[in-house]
Image: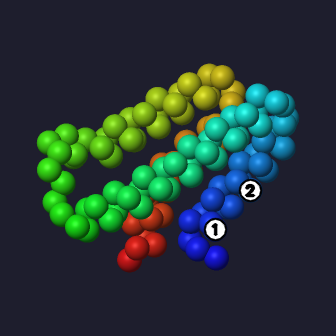
Amino acid sequence: MKTWHLELATVGIVLAVVTLFTGGHLADWIATLAVLTTFAHGQVSDRLAEREAARATPIVDCYPWVRRYYVGKELLWCGYFVLQRSWPALVGVGLFLAYPIWRKWWRR
């Protein structure tokens, strides 16, 4: 089993458990699937960025802002999901914020 399979399965299980224990309404399951799909997209994007960074120095001027925007958007989503009481999506915010830290640790 590849690492990305294990990561995706773990996130899927965590989200499903949260969804089940917080009501399991249709909107929550849609949020769960949206978060899981967004996470999968992030996995691929992160791996592409890792490979590109290993090949050359980024030449895009705004490259240093990529992590700042990432954290900023997740914090804004966090506020929105708290107000909406969308617990699966809120758990997703935590997973998205933890993922880059996990990848950095795993690569070492």
74 and 44: which one is in front? 44
- In three-dimensional space, the C-alpha distance between marks 1 and 2, rounded to whole angstroms, equals 10 Å
Task: State the residue at coordinates (17%, 45%).
Answer: 60
Left or right, 22 with respect to 79, comes to: right
27 vs 33: above or below: above
The image's mark for residue 13 is 2
Give residue 105's position: percent from left, percent from top.
42, 70
Left or right, 45 with respect to 85, comes to: left
For marks 1 and 2, give the one nearer the viewer. Answer: 1
SS of the residue under disc 2: helix
- Identify the residue position indicated by label 1 in the image: 6
Look at label 1 and name its amino acid: Leu
Task: State the residue at coordinates (39%, 66%).
Answer: 104
Q: Residues within 10 Å of mark 2 (few under 14, many from 20)?
A: few
SS of the residue under disc 1: helix
Task: State the residue at coordinates (32%, 46%).
Answer: 67
Q: Residues within 10 Å of mark 1 (few under 14, many from 20)?
A: few
Look at label 2 and name its amino acid: Ile
Give residue 63's position: percent from left, percent from top.
22, 46
Q: Would residue 19 be visible to someone looking at this image? A: yes
The image's mark for residue 101 is none
Report if the CB atoms under discs 1 and 2 are less than 8 Å apart. Answer: no
Q: Residue furthest top?
A: 83
Circle nearer the N terminus (1, 2):
1
Q: Colour scheme in the image?
A: rainbow
Give residue 99's position: percent from left, percent from top.
49, 56
87 and 41: which one is in front? 41
Left or right, 106 with respect to 10, comes to: left
92 vs 102: above or below: above
Task: State the residue at coordinates (47%, 56%).
Answer: 44
Q: Would residue 88 be visible to someone looking at this image? A: no
**Which quadrant: the N terminus?**
bottom right
